[in-house]
Image (cartoon, rainbow, N blue to C red):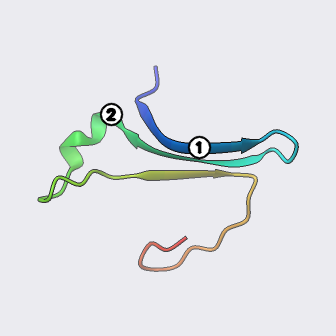
Amino acid sequence: MSTKVTIKHLWDDENQAGYHLFTNALDSFLADENGYEPVYLELNGVEFTASSPGNV
């Protein structure tokens, strides 16, 4: 059973590429002092460049 809570997703069958932006239902204990929980980005079949501080 997945605990992923989808915010937005896109999948292109022709190119076998896409993304999934989500939170995890069990991550509420990881919230910071302002109540913000982690957000995850899963990329499939796409090129990307990542840099600090957390830019994709």
10 sits left or right of 56 in the view: right
Q: Position of residue 21 (x, y in %)?
A: 51, 48
Q: Relative to residue 56, is residue 46 depicted above or below?
A: above
Q: Amino acid at mark 1?
A: His
Rate crowding at label 1 as few (under 14), some (14 to 19) or many (20 or more) other CA atoms within 10 Å.
few
Choose top left, top right, bottom left or bottom right for residue 54. Answer: bottom left
Q: Amino acid at mark 2?
A: Ala
Which residue is at 18% across, 57% downward?
A: 32
Q: Relative to residue 44, is residue 48 depicted above or below?
A: below
**N-terminal-most mark, 2 or 1:** 1
Q: In front: mark 2 or mark 1?
A: 1
18 sits left or right of 22 in the view: right
Which residue is at 33% across, 52% downward?
A: 38
Q: Position of residue 9 (x, y in %)?
A: 59, 43
Q: Position of residue 33 (x, y in %)?
A: 11, 59
32 sits left or right of 1 in the view: left
Q: Relative to residue 54, is residue 23 depicted above or below?
A: above
Whole-angstrom CA distance, mark 2 to mark 1, is: 17 Å
Which residue is at 41% across, 78% downward?
A: 53
Which residue of the protein is positioned furthest toward the bottom in this rendering?
52
Q: Position of residue 50 (x, y in %)?
A: 57, 73
Q: Relative to residue 53, is residue 39 depicted above or below?
A: above
Question: Which residue position holds label 1?
Answer: 9
6 sits left or right of 33 in the view: right
Question: Which residue position holds label 2?
Answer: 25
Rate crowding at label 2 as few (under 14), some (14 to 19) or many (20 or more) other CA atoms within 10 Å.
few
Which residue of the protein is positioned furthest toward the left in this rendering?
33
Which residue is at 71% across, 42% downward?
A: 11
The secondary element bearing badge 1 is classed as strand
